[in-house]
Image (spheres, grey):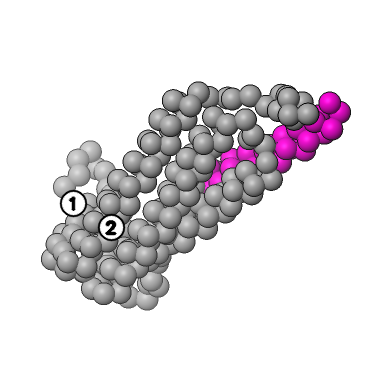
Amino acid sequence: MGGSAKRGQKKVVSRVDAIFLMAVSSGAALLSTWLTVSGIVALFTGPVTLELPVATSHQTAPGLSLGASGHFTSVEATLPLLPAGPAESLAWAGVLNQVGLLAVLALVFFLAYRLQGRILFTARSAHIVGAAGVVLAVAGLAGQVLDGVGRTRLAEMIGANARAVGESQVFAAEINLAPFVVSIGLFLIAGVFEYGRRLQKDTEGLV
């Protein structure tokens, strides 16, 4: 009975490889968290150097040759101390981005642990993979929006993003689609896990 229950369930990676992957993911989680916390502290203590978006074409680039013309799309500014509002927005953006990263690293740790075992395709595995995809998508979007809001506001406050008369305020931010692509991949993997679990269950029932 015990032998038939484990039939078809063998280790995918060795114990040493699994421990290595778990150690790397844990180390990356600790290091990235420390860097995030250090960055957040710097936002409230200053000075801090940030790349701020310039959402208007009125900031022209002088001195170009060959009859070329251009305008700035961003400016690197060093501020001795950030105002409370933008600092809080950037801090929450850092927290959410870190949450998304930790979700992926935790998933790597979990899969490495499961891969060295004999049971991989379970309902819990599918749910954890899917949950990681949801967290990554939500945290990634919210973090980027808050980051864009904070940087745009700072650009307005220091006068780098000055608007012409009658020009409406523009939200300037580059949305990175990588978290969404990865989250879609995780949803697909969750589906594969669920299919594998059902197939494994059906196979065990035939033995």
Q: Is residue 171 above or below residue 185?
A: below
The residue tagged 1 is: 62
Residue at image point 28% right, 52% down: 34
| Dot 2 amino acid type | Val
Q: Main secondary structure of the magenta part?
A: helix
Left or right of 109? Residue 128 is right
Q: Earlier in the sequence, mark 1 or mark 2?
A: 2
Q: Is residue 200 magenta?
A: yes
Percent position (x, y) of residue 36? 30, 54
Question: What span is in magenta?
Answer: 180-207
Kindly check if marks 1 and 2 are in contact, taking CB atoms under 8 A apart as contact. no
Q: Please name whichever residue, 7 or 129, is drawn nearer the observer in this view of the structure.
A: 7
**Mark 1 surroundings within 10 Å by alpha-carbon count, few (fewer than 14), some (14 through 19), many (20 or more):** few
**Alpha carbon distance from label 1 to label 2:** 39 Å
Q: Nearer the viewer, residue 128 or 54?
A: 128
Q: Quadrant of residue 16?
A: top left
SS label for mark 2: helix
Residue positioned most to the front: 1
Residue drawn at the location 62% of the way across and 43% of the way down: 125
Would you say 49 lies left or right of 128 here? left
What residue appears at the point 69 percent right and 45 percent down from the top-left corner?
123
Which residue, given by chain and number where applicable, does mark 2 sit on? Answer: 37
